[in-house]
């Protein structure tokens, strides 16, 4: 086992010190943990074992100038470094990466609810440049929610491209024996993010998975064991170990705020900022191939792209040696490296130089004027890092141009793409603003429930609706749109990193997941936005906008304001006081937008309004009010739908299902948009009147139900434009089944109870739609429509299999072809059912009534339509009955009173042969004479019917 060795200069500082023995004991105990260097949670990582600790210690010693060592002896006055400094340097180096050597039981102990590892004071609160440390259990749960939502790129960076194609993270098995390699890597990413914090807490509480104590299977809790010899230095040791992962100035702020450490440059006798700077730079300097030996690379075979790059960078560094400048180091690089590796190494060396500059600056700020006690001499022996990458001859010898080259987007590209993406539709800009405002209101409600805060206790704007959409005309004739909400508001970070960044959807951020994803990985809030490009749709409305916002967690003095245009290169986020919680955005409207929305017409007529172009929200909550201010009294615009989905109990005409992946899918045949998702219509503006989603149903036969989807997880496959779905409804089978069950229930409750009633029945279920001549006149006349078919003794809904059970030899279909205005009043009210039932019984015949609508917006003469529809009936019979038709006869009359004259009834005998229409392949239609003025009748047939029913006697 490689032993951790202390460099001689550090040993001399510890000679005859009471700290020497406990530091040696700690080093031996840590060495036992590091010795196997297996890194179960980091199978792809470079060396983090005892050799790495020894190299870091030697680098730290080399970073200390010779003059400092000279003035650190017992007889030096002032003495620059002492035993306490050596103890902190060694102990912090031992602990800085020890968290990466956790074992599964120790990890589970760390993230358990009763973990002894707690956030430390000061770090447990928000500080400048630091978010409050959460309890480990909460931190782990938040990470689990994030891990389940990792993008393909995120997952690839952790587990490798091949694994990411075949494996997704869902849950960590409770049994450690069921953990796969990828589970270990997912946990490793969590530890990597927080290993610097954990190093600090290990110094205080001990090592996760080991009992506190000094035995072989124990580990000291230096900060909580009152008798431990390093107890007074435990916090400083942990802080120094932590410093390699956080800002050095943050650590200084902690020292200045700590009652134990404030007021002195040498807390507990150590100039602790100096060990911090040494550790940070020395750890960074471990970039050569000694940390990535080829044998170890073959054994570990890294899969993660990030790990592969780290190994490659270490192997590409041939040596780090003294440069011509005594205060510089030279990094010699293998010339046979790729462009990607060249750029990564250049960034790495630039980062090392930045770390040296940062550490030097902080040391100078803290100790630069303290010449009396010699602290001004505590600086770094290295000030510059040079490399062969800086050499022009090295760069010129490479087979490529050593500069990053790739596709780049012009800042104007996003605004240029908005119009091609959405079309020249200013109404889309209105939709996006309403969507953002509605989402903000929903998020505030969810936030209040999570944090147990009453909504009425918040400083919200006083307005008559949750969302106000106001079109306002100024005195100079210009117009602007103002959308204000009583929502959660935005922070400066949200504005900068999400609102103004295309594609950066806030709902995919860790912050949103922390606030709005529950422990079962289910969103707590309904949110319509998902793509992260809606803000740019504002420029469909006009050239510029102004936004005022304040987040619910911000005090009254920390609101934000921005002003931006499509040509803005730099956007200033201005701090603004006295803002209520929520967001208000004002958009200057262009001339094209004013014309498109017909705002000037609204200002001159009380009947005109923008209509569908702005009427996107269609649920009952949040409340959305749209107004136009152009006269003394504001004009309130009509909201066509207010579906009772959120705050109202569903009325009887609505049904609900809960398919997998969706919170609820409500449907109705009543007054509602064809499809809405999380409160907004899914449709093109110009297609509101059209049933876009009938494509999922038998168009000629059935009404499509109106569907309202609550989709917290964003599983509905919306297109980016939100005009339609990218593919079919994911829950179409569940929806069809529920509609069919509803139809069956309707038939049981409202259907006929006797054959006579079945003949007269006109109580149609809303699913049924009268057959439309206009929609598809060439289609099969009776394709799939749901009606009742009866014999003299039995009745069934029209269905091929059910019809076969009747065993009828023939079927009589009768009904009316009407215009939509007559549809609701027509029916077989004058039918003599008894006579017809006698005929059906005597002739082994079935009968069904039919009602067909001839759309009023159809083209051509009414007399032309019967031939187009009834020709197929004459040829094929009623296909819904799936009956082999040997013969059929069709009679159609223009008599609006549903009566047949004697001359018409006589024509039911087989027609004489005539010139056949080649498209019909049956006898030609012929006009039937009638004494009734204005009434025209036509007849056609094929085959020979065995008998004829005298229809007149049935009417």
Image (cartoon, rainbow, N blue to C red):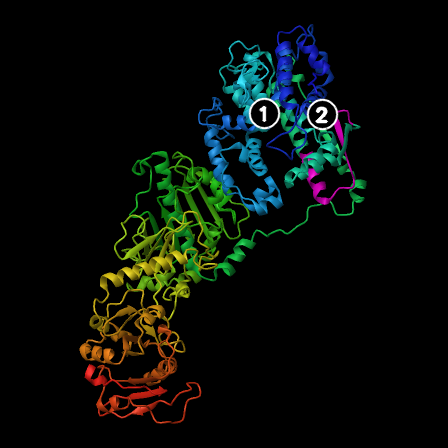
Residue that appears at 26% across and 61% down: 746
Image vertical order of residue 810 relative to residue 720, above or below: below
Which residue matches tag 2?
382
Q: Quadrant of the C terminus?
A: bottom left
Image vertical order of residue 196 relative to residue 618, above or below: above
The answer to which quarter of the image holds residue 70 is top right
The answer to which quarter of the image holds residue 731 is bottom left
Image vertical order of residue 474 relative to residue 148, above or below: below
Q: Quadrant of the N terminus?
A: top right
Q: Which residues are magenta?
A: 325-350
Residues 92 and 903: in front is 903
Residues 86 and 45: in front is 45
Give the numbered dot on residue 243. 1
Q: CA distance from mark 1 to mark 2?
A: 19 Å
Q: Residues within 10 Å of mark 2 (few under 14, many from 20)?
A: many
Element on which disc 2 rests: loop
Please give the count of numbered marks on the rendered protein. 2
Q: Nearer the viewer, mark 1 or mark 2?
A: 1
Q: x%, y% of residue 20?
A: 64, 10
Residue 802 seen in the figure: yes
Q: Is residue 344 magenta?
A: yes
């Amino acid at each position: 086992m490689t032993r951790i060795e202390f460099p001689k200069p550090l040993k001399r500082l510890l000679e005859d010190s009471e700290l020497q023995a406990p530091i040696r004991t700690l080093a031996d105990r840590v060495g036992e943990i590091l010795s196997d260097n297996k890194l179960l949670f980091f199978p792809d990582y470079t060396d983090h074992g005892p050799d790495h600790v020894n190299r870091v210690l030697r680098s730290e010693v080399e970073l200390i100038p010779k003059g400092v060592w000279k003035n650190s002896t017992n007889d030096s006055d002032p003495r620059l470094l002492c035993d306490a400094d050596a103890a902190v340097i060694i102990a912090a180096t031992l602990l800085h990466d020890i968290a990466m050597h956790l074992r599964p039981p120790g990890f589970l102990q760390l993230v358990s609810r009763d973990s002894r590892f707690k956030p430390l004071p000061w770090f447990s609160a928000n500080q400048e440049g630091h978010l409050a440390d959460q309890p480990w259990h909460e931190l782990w749960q938040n990470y689990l929610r994030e891990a389940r939502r990792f993008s393909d790129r995120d997952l690839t960076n952790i587990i490798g491209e091949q694994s990411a194609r075949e494996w997704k993270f869902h849950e960590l098995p409770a049994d450690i024996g069921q953990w796969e390699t990828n589970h270990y890597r997912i946990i490793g990413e969590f530890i990597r993010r927080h290993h610097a914090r954990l190093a600090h807490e290990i110094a205080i509480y001990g090592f996760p998975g080991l009992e506190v104590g000094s035995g072989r299977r124990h580990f000291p809790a230096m900060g909580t064991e009152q008798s431990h010899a390093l107890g007074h230095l435990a916090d400083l040791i942990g802080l120094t170990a932590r410093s390699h992962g956080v800002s050095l100035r943050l650590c200084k702020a902690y020292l200045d705020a700590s009652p134990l450490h404030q007021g002195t440059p040498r807390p507990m006798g150590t100039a602790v900022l100096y060990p911090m700077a040494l550790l940070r730079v020395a750890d960074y300097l471990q970039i050569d191939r000694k940390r990535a030996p080829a044998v170890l690379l073959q054994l570990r075979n890294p899969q993660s792209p990030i790990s592969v790059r780290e190994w490659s960078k270490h192997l590409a560094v041939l040596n780090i040696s003294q440069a011509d400048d005594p205060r510089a180091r030279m990094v010699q690089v293998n010339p046979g490296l790729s462009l990607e590796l060249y750029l990564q190494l250049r960034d790495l060396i630039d980062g090392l130089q930045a770390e040296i500059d940062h550490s030097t600056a902080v040391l100078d700020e803290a100790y630069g004027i303290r010449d009396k006690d010699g602290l001004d001499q505590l600086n770094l022996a290295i000030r510059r890092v040079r490399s062969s990458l800086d050499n022009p001859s090295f760069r010129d010898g490479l087979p490529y141009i050593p500069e990053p080259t790739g596709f780049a987007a012009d800042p104007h590209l996003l605004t240029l793409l908005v119009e091609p993406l959405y079309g020249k539709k200013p109404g889309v800009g209105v939709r996006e603003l309403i969507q953002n405002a509605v989402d903000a209101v929903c998020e505030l409600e969810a936030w209040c429930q999570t944090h147990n805060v009453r909504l009425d206790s918040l400083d919200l704007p006083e307005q008559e609706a949750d969302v106000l959409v106001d079109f306002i005309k100024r005195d100079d004739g210009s117009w602007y749109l103002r959308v204000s909400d009583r929502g959660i508001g935005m922070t400066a970070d949200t504005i900068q990193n999400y609102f103004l960044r295309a594609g950066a959807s806030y709902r995919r951020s860790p912050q949103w997941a922390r606030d709005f994803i529950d422990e079962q990985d289910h969103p707590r809030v309904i949110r319509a936005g998902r793509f992260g490009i809606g803000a740019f749709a504002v420029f469909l409305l006009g050239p510029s906008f102004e936004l005022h916002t304040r987040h619910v967690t911000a005090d009254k003095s920390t609101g934000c304001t921005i002003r931006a245009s499509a040509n803005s290169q730099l956007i200033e986020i201005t701090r603004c006081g006295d803002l209520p919680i929520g967001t208000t955005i004002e958009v200057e409207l262009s001339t094209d937008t004013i014309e498109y929305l017909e705002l000037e017409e609204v200002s001159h007529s009380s009947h005109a309004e923008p209509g569908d172009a702005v009427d996107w929200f269609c649920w009952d909550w949040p409340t959305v009010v749209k107004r136009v201010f152009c006269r003394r009294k504001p004009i309130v615009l009509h909201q066509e739908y207010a579906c009772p989905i959120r705050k109202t109990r569903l009325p009887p005409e609505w049904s609900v299902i809960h398919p997998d992946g969706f919170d609820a899918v409500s449907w109705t045949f009543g007054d509602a948009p064809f499809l809405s998702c999380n409160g907004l219509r899914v449709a093109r503006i110009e297609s509101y009147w059209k049933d876009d989603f009938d494509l999922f149903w038998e168009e000629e036969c059935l009404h499509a139900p109106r569907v309202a989807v609550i989709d917290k997880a964003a599983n509905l496959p919306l297109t980016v434009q939100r005009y339609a779905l990218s593919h079919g409804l994911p829950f179409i089978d569940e929806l069809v089944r529920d509609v069919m069950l509803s139809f069956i229930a309707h038939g049981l409750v409202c259907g006929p109870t006797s054959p006579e009633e079945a003949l007269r029945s006109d109580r149609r279920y809303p699913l049924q739609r009268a057959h439309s001549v206009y929609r598809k006149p060439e289609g099969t006349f009776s394709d799939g429509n749901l009606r009742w078919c009866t014999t003299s003794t039995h009745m069934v809904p029209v269905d091929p299999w059910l019809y076969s059970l009747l065993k009828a030899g023939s079927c009589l279909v009768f009904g009316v072809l009407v215009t939509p205005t007559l549809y609701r009043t027509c029916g077989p009210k004058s039918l003599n059912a008894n006579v017809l039932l006698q005929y059906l019984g005597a002739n082994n015949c079935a009968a069904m009534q039919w009602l067909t609508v001839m759309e009023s917006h159809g083209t051509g003469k009414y007399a032309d339509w019967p031939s187009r529809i009834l020709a197929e009936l004459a040829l094929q019979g009623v296909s819904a009955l799936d009956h082999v038709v040997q013969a059929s006869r069709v009679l159609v009359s223009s008599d609006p009173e549903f009566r047949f004259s004697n001359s018409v009834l006589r024509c039911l005998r087989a027609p004489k042969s005539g010139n056949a229409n080649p498209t019909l392949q049956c006898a030609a239609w012929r006009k039937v004479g009638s004494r009734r003025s204005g009434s025209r009748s036509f007849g056609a047939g094929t085959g020979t019917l065995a008998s004829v029913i005298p229809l007149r006697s049935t009417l």
